[in-house]
Image: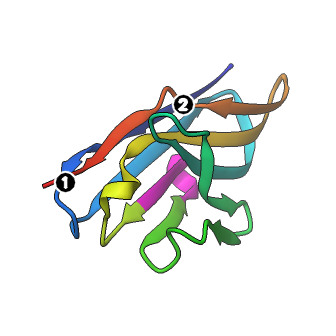
Amino acid sequence: QVQVVESGGGLVQPGGSLRLSCTVSGSIVSIIAMGWARQAPGKQRESVAAITSGGSTDYADSVKGRFTISRDNAKNTVYLQMNSLKPEDTAVYYCNAKVLAMMGTFNNWGQGIQVTVSS
């Protein structure tokens, strides 16, 4: 079984910064890719950023230049550094992990964490 747990959300003023963390645990052989998506009230979930096992990254146009995704392979953890936050970044942020585990390939989501950008 594979568990995905996010942390680091909260309330921040416009222009501020937050760093989200996501750790994967379980009977993992290797992590194929990890990423972040978000869902604002009344909107569909959208991909924000992703990083592959080789370190290649991809970002939504709306966050390019403001958000940075990185990973610590030794800790099975991915980070999302969010700078210059805007009210429209307010959403529940979900971490996704595609992993090769002892029982096969899994594509799991975390429970989500709230990020609120407001003055």
| Residue 51 position within the rendered picture, expressed as x and y whole percent measured from the top left | 65, 62
In the rendered view of the protein, which quadrant contains the C terminus? bottom left
Tell me the SS state at disc 2: loop
User: Is 101 left or right of 70, judged from the image as shown?
Assistant: right
Name the residue rendered at 65%, 50% in the picture: 34
Q: Is residue 83 above or below residue 71?
A: below
In this picture, which residue range is highlighted in magenta? 72-80
Outermost residue, top side: 1
Q: Residue at x 61, y 68 (%)?
A: 59
Q: Residue at x 52, y 65 (%)?
A: 70
Residue denoted by label 2: 110
Residue 8 placement: quadrant = top left
> Front-most of 117 and 79?
117
- Outermost residue on the right side: it is 104
- Horizontal side of residue 30 vs 89, given as left or right: right
Name the residue at 70% across, 34% down. 28
Q: Is residue 29 magenta?
A: no
What residue did someone put label 1 on? 12
* 24 relative position to 89: left or right: right
> Label 2 near label 1: C-beta < 8 Å?
no
Q: Quadrant of the N terminus?
A: top right
- Please state the horizontal and vertical placement of residue 16, each as a whole percent of the image: 21, 66
Q: Which mark is residue 77?
A: none
Q: Position of residue 49 (x, y in %)?
A: 59, 60
Of pointers 1 and 2, the one earlier in the residue sequence: 1
Q: In the image, is residue 77 part of the stretch drawn in magenta?
A: yes
Q: Is residue 8 at all visible to an observer of this figure?
A: no
The label nearer to you, 1 versus 2, is 1
Secondary element at image label 1: strand
